[in-house]
Amino acid sequence: YTQPIEMRMNEMIAGVRGDVAVKIYGDDLDALTQKAAEVGAILGAVPGAEEGIRYQMPVVSLDGTYVVHYSAWKHHIGLYPVPVLDGALEAELAPRRSGKDTVKFMYDEPMPLDLIGRLTRELVERRTRG
């Protein structure tokens, strides 16, 4: 439940309307454009997905069931919860694991958009299978 006046004030302060917003700051337009594309790839990897807030974190949901939470930190983007997967996909994720269900993508490394897309598709398939 949200108070309408409080919600509107928060939207005005943030400069956006919606449940989830990603703001990217900096002086280098090329770097900002690339980061925006990376964030867009993460958010757009689930067709028909809805964005929202759960546990005070952005979440991507499908048919009312969460698929993945994500958060941008000082040095990385984190995805939660990511269960241990099978085969080659898990082998690629293993170096990025932090804890049993957290995957971190560090800003000082190239963002593996293909890997994020494959991971997201696998998480969606797991959700739709039950």
Image (tube, rainbow, N blue to C red):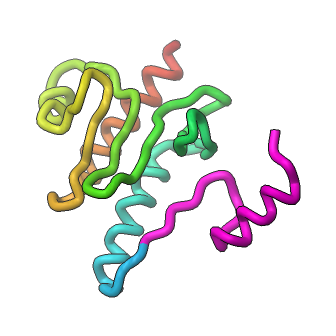
Please tell me which residue is depicted at 61% across the width and 46% down the height of the picture.
51
Q: Is residue 101 left or right of residue 6?
A: left
Residue 109 at x, y percent in the picture:
15, 58
Residue 19 at x, y percent in the picture:
67, 52
Identity of the residue furthest to the right in this view: 4
Residue 8 at x, y percent in the picture:
80, 63
Residue 98 within the magenta-colored segment of the rendering: no
State which quarter of the image contains the N terminus.
top right
Q: How many marks?
A: 0
Closer to the camera, 40 or 98? Answer: 98
Q: Which residues are magenta?
A: 1-24
Q: Is residue 103 left or right of residue 17?
A: left
Q: Is residue 120 above or below residue 35?
A: above
In terms of image quadrants, where is residue 62? top right
Q: Is residue 6 left or right of residue 10?
A: right
Closer to the camera, 96 or 117? Answer: 96
Please tell me which residue is depicted at 28% across the width and 52% down the height of the picture.
76
Please tell me which residue is depicted at 81% across the width and 45% down the height of the picture.
2
In terms of image quadrants, where is residue 40? bottom left
Please tell me which residue is depicted at 67% across the width and 29% down the height of the picture.
64
Q: Is residue 99 above or below residue 75?
A: above
